[in-house]
Image (cartoon, coloured by chain):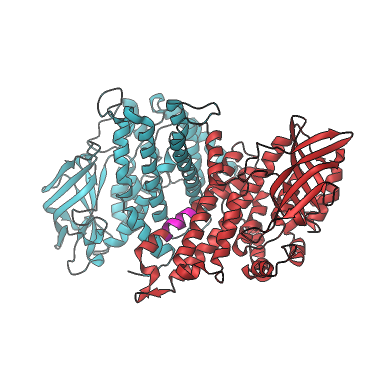
């Protein structure tokens, strides 16, 4: 089934929902933010992801994982969207795990995948260099250096970059694209934590004459562009899942508020102007759910149209979440503008997820090109 | 969706079906419907396009495959969901045209199967299945549009018959129909519970129709007048004053049908069509950047809507259907089709403005664009659908 959850997925969703609402409600994000926590995530919560098996989703069974697909990874991300839990799940358990299981050498897999499965460590993908996502225009260069590589360049929006045990740096190399493992602390690697609007983790990274060995390369430079496309599509659809969960949560809270708030001697939910906007948003949410689940399945099936489906899903999720959070604030009125109400935290998170790996405009441009116009 | 391959009887059914279709579907009927003229509506007054069209209807009708899932005793094919899916797949594989389209199949049939008497079902349903009787729908009135339950066409109740007087409007193809199913007022003291559902022979004395010319220049709809029309009591479907229940059930069907406009045929992709007409830049992008962005937004929404239709089907089969969802689908599908035709007109430019002559196929683009404006009015306006979603799906308060 593409859309209806089977028994196994239903159990996974219920598990993630229960765990997150108990261990990491929205208050958890707020507490980390207000404490100016140096890591920006809770090590205990991340270990919990390991205990629950969430960080093991994409890791093959032979390496201590569950060997599940992107559909399951997305289901967990959708639940994360409901509570905004800030963890290295996306950077490590989705992006790094997918890259390593897909193209990592036996040695790389053995070194990293069991650790990811156990949530023992953090990895970060360093791809973006410009304010707007443009993966085709890399300035970072990896040059052959004896038996290894020398890397120079600058990166931004590196999720969990400051907390990572190793970065996976994307660079131009040998006329192709290289994805290189760079351990934290490598000489010439400068990582600056950037506190972001959503109180989640990101960093700017500068690579200045960074030297790594030949065994740092994941896959090959010839197939690197394809590998990068692959991991970005996985990231896009999983981000779309988080946006969907986030939008569902905001919508539910907003509709509930309309059923309680009284003005002019009546519930404001009686006003047709608000009812119609809610009904339209309901449609947006359902068709976003539909296209996101279709894209997840297309990726897991390695379908020929998977890139198009992912572009459509991410575009639609961005548009829907943007509308949901804006209506959420507007329909809550003045209270919606306060830091005390949680709606604003959802709006901030949505903004970051929209930008991540390409917003609606980027995805629609891509979908149009794939469709031949 | 491919049918379950593990059941060997289904494999046999598929083989037999393919063989039968190959032997019985005339070659002329093996291409998709290209225009209104290719559609077979059936009925006493229907002019068949060809002998092949007549034969195709007759053969499929005899087998009950015009209505594959209706029970055999009422002229249907008696097929299961899985078998019907196989029949659809095999028909698609051979490009077999639907042998018959009708309001009888889409609307009256489902209502009658649920609410009709045994005698009514045995009499009317086989005639629908064989395409012998063409039906039209008498719901709206000049003063009962969105507020349908305020309808005023009066049916005086006598011992063995009704006397119907009043006017219906937007009766699709009433001038070509043999029978009409109508909502009439049998109790003036009550609103929703004073309405009955009756079947009326269009040849009855006192029935007359007048086509309405629309902005598209076409006249698919009529006004239908009833002047003291005598209708046998046996033509009442369901309970006296119980017609609203049937009407609501039928409206759901109509909404699904209209909402499914985007789903049924695979329409021409707007973006590629535009690029072929207007040209591309060196990177392969449609040369008009602003128009391109609008089309890209439309196509994302269209793809998502198609996925939503399929999701709704899967949810229904899994017993997870969302109540009143058909209103949401109807709303979105209608608005989407209107957007499509606004864009198609922009892509067509001056060419799409021609109203007459062969070059424009007699203004096909402009007429279709204008016709699409009714999508968000017929079968309940978009505003009414949003009201339904707000109240019945979201549980928002109010009248």
Can residue B34 be seen here? The reply is no
Q: Is B199 located above or below residue A298 in the figure?
A: below
| Image-based side of B218 in relation to B344, left or right | left
- Residue at 66 percent across and 57 percent down: it is A8
Shown colour of chain B = cyan
Q: Main secondary structure of the magenta part?
A: helix
Residue A367 lies left or right of residue B21; in this view the side is: right
- B236 or B270: nearer the eye? B270
Q: Quadrant of residue B160?
A: bottom left
Taking the spot 62% from the left edge, 68% from the top edge, the residue there is: A26
Residue B344 in percent (x, y) is at: 38, 35
Q: Colour of chain A?
A: red
Q: Is residue A117 above or below residue B357?
A: below
- Is A296 inside the magenta-drawn segment? no
For the point 33% across and 49% down, which residue is it? B376
The residue under the point 36% across, 43% down is: B338
Direction from residue B239 to residue B223 in the image, left or right: left
x and y percent of residue A88 in the render?
A: 72, 57
Quadrant position of residue B129: top left
Q: Nearer the viewer, residue A218 or A21?
A: A218
User: Where in the figure is residue A84, as x and y percent of width and height?
Assistant: 63, 62
Q: Is residue A281 magenta?
A: yes
Q: Position of residue A304 (x, y in %)?
A: 61, 36
Instruction: Give the residues in magenta.
Output: A278-285
Q: Depth check: give the residue in front, B202 or B329.
A: B329
- Residue placed most toward the observer, B52 or A372: A372
Query: Which residue sits furthest bottom?
Result: A265
User: Can the viewer see residue B75 in this picture?
Assistant: yes
Q: How many marks?
A: 0
């Amino acid at each position: 089934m593409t859309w209806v959850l089977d028994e196994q997925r239903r159990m996974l969703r219920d598990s993630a929902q229960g765990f997150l609402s108990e261990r990491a409600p929205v208050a958890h994000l707020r507490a980390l933010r207000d404490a100016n926590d140096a890591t920006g995530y809770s090590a205990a919560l991340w270990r919990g992801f390991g205990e629950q098996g969430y960080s093991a989703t994409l890791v093959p069974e032979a390496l201590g994982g569950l060997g599940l697909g992107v559909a399951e990874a997305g289901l967990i991300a959708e639940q994360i969207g409901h509570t905004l839990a800030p963890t290295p799940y996306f950077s490590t358990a989705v992006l790094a795990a997918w890259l390593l299981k897909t193209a990592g050498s036996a040695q790389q897999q053995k070194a990293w995948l069991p650790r990811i499965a156990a949530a023992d460590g953090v990895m970060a993908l360093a791809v973006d260099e410009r304010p707007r996502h443009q993966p085709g225009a890399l300035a970072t260069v990896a040059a052959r250096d004896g038996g290894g590589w020398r890397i120079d360049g600058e990166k931004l929006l590196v999720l969990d970059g400051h907390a990572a045990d190793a970065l996976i740096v994307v660079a131009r190399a040998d006329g192709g694209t290289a994805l290189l493992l760079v351990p934290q602390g490598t000489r010439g690697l400068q990582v600056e934590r950037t506190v972001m609007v959503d109180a989640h983790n990101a960093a700017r990274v500068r690579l200045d004459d960074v030297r790594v060995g030949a065994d740092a390369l994941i896959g090959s430079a010839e197939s690197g562009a394809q590998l990068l496309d692959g991991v970005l599509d996985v990231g896009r659809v999983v981000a779309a899942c988080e946006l969907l969960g986030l939008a569902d949560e905001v919508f539910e809270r907003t509709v509930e508020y309309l059923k309680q708030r009284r003005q002019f001697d009546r519930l404001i939910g009686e006003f047709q102007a608000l009812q119609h906007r809610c009904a339209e948003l309901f449609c947006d949410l359902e068709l976003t759910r539909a296209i996101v689940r279709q894209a997840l399945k297309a990726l897991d099936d390695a379908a020929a149209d998977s890139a198009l489906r992912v572009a459509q899903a991410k575009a639609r999720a961005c548009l829907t979440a943007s509308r949901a959070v804006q209506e959420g604030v507007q329909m809550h009125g003045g209270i919606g503008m306060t830091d005390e109400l949680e709606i604003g935290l959802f709006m901030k998170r949505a903004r970051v997820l929209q930008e991540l790996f390409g917003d609606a405009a980027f995805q629609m441009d891509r979908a149009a090109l794939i469709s031949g116009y | 969706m491919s049918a379950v391959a593990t059941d060997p009887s289904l494999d046999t059914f598929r083989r037999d079906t393919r063989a039968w279709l190959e032997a019985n579907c005339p070659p002329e009927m093996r291409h998709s419907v290209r225009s209104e003229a290719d559609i077979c509506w059936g009925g006493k007054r229907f002019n068949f396009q060809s002998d092949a069209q007549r034969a195709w209807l007759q053969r499929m009708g005899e087998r009950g495959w015009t209505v594959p899932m209706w029970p055999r005793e009422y002229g249907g094919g008696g097929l299961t969901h899985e078998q019907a899916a196989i029949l659809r797949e095999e028909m698609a594989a051979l490009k077999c045209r639907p042998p018959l389209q009708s309001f009888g199949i889409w609307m009256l049939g489902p209502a009658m199967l649920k609410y009709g008497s045994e005698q009514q079902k045995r009499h009317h349903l086989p005639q629908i299945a064989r395409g012998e009787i063409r039906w039209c729908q008498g719901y709206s009135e000049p003063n009962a549009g969105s507020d349908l339950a305020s309808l005023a066409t009066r049916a005086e109740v006598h011992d063995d018959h009704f006397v119907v007087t009043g006017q219906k409007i937007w009766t699709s193809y009433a001038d070509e129909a043999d029978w009409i199913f109508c909502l009439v007022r049998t109790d003036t003291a009550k609103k929703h519970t004073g309405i009955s559902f009756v079947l009326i022979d269009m040849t009855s004395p006192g029935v007359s129709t007048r086509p309405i010319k629309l902005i598209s220049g076409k006249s698919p709809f009529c006004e239908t007048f009833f002047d003291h029309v005598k209708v046998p009591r046996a033509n009442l479907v369901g309970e006296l004053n119980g017609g609203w229940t049937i009407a609501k059930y039928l409206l759901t069907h109509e909404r699904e049908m209209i909402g499914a406009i985007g789903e049924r045929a695979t329409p021409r992709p707007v973006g590629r069509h535009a690029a072929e007409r207007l040209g591309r830049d060196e990177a392969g992008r449609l040369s008009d950047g602003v128009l391109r962005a609008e089309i890209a937004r439309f196509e994302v929404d269209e793809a998502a809507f198609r996925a939503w239709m399929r999701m709704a089907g899967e949810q229904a089969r899994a017993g997870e259907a969302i109540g009143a969802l058909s209103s949401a689908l109807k709303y979105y599908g209608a608005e989407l089709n209107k957007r499509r035709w606004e864009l198609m007109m922009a892509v067509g430019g001056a060419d799409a403005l021609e109203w007459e002559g062969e070059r424009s196929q007699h203004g096909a683009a402009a007429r279709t664009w204008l016709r699409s404006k009714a999508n968000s009015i017929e079968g309940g306006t978009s505003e009414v659908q949003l009201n339904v979603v707000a109240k019945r799906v979201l549980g928002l308060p109010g009248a």
